[in-house]
Amino acid sequence: MQITSLEALIRGADGCSPYEVFEKLTPSQLHQLDVDSRLTALEMFSEMKFDGFMSINLLPMSLLEYPDAVKMISPACMTSIWV
């Protein structure tokens, strides 16, 4: 059996569910966490040198709340690709 992809998931520091993390945040904080966690996941994936794919989810409203989110995330996606 070969692992072909990974999924980046948000969990609390104590391993709690994303819902428990999200319910404590304001909408602005939630969207900032969403963008920041994607960047962190991409950095971690790049460091792993994993020979496969990574799946990440993004809250669509984060792209509206932080118009530069795509500009921030796109370069991180490119640096996560290695040959």
Image (tube, rainbow, N blue to C red):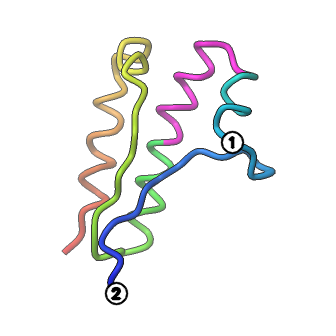
Which quadrant of the view contains residue 19? top right
Instruction: Please identify the quadrant where the N terminus is shown.
Output: bottom left
Q: Please say if 56 is above or below 33.
A: below
Which quadrant of the view contains residue 39? top left
What are the residue bounds of the magenta stretch? Answer: 25-37
Q: Residue at x 52, y 22 (%)?
A: 31
Which amino acid is tagged 2? Met
Question: Are the residues flagged by discs 2 and 1 in contact, CB closer than 8 Å?
Answer: no
Circle 2 sits on which residue? 1
Which quadrant of the view contains residue 51? bottom left
> Left or right: where does residue 65 sit relative to residue 9?
left
Which amino acid is tagged 1? Ser
Q: Earlier in the sequence, mark 2 or mark 1?
A: 2
> 3 and 45: which one is in front?
3
How much space separates mark 2 and mark 1, taking CA atoms?
Answer: 29 Å
Q: Which secondary structure, mark 1?
A: loop
Q: Around disc 1, counting alpha carbons within 10 Å, would you say few (fewer than 14), some (14 to 19), or many (20 or more)?
A: few
Q: Residue at x 59, y 45 (%)?
A: 10
Q: Which secondary structure, mark 2?
A: loop
Residue 9, how many percent across, how many down?
53, 49
Circle 1 sits on which residue? 17
> 19 and 29: which one is in front?
19
| Prevailing secondary structure class for the magenta stretch in the rendered image | helix
Q: Residue at x 29, y 50 (%)?
A: 77
Instruction: Please identify the quadrant where the C terminus is shown.
Output: bottom left
Residue 71, how many percent across, how many down?
29, 31
- Reply yes or no: does residue 9 show up in magenta: no
> Left or right: where does residue 59 sit relative to residue 5?
right
Q: Residue at x 44, y 56 (%)?
A: 43
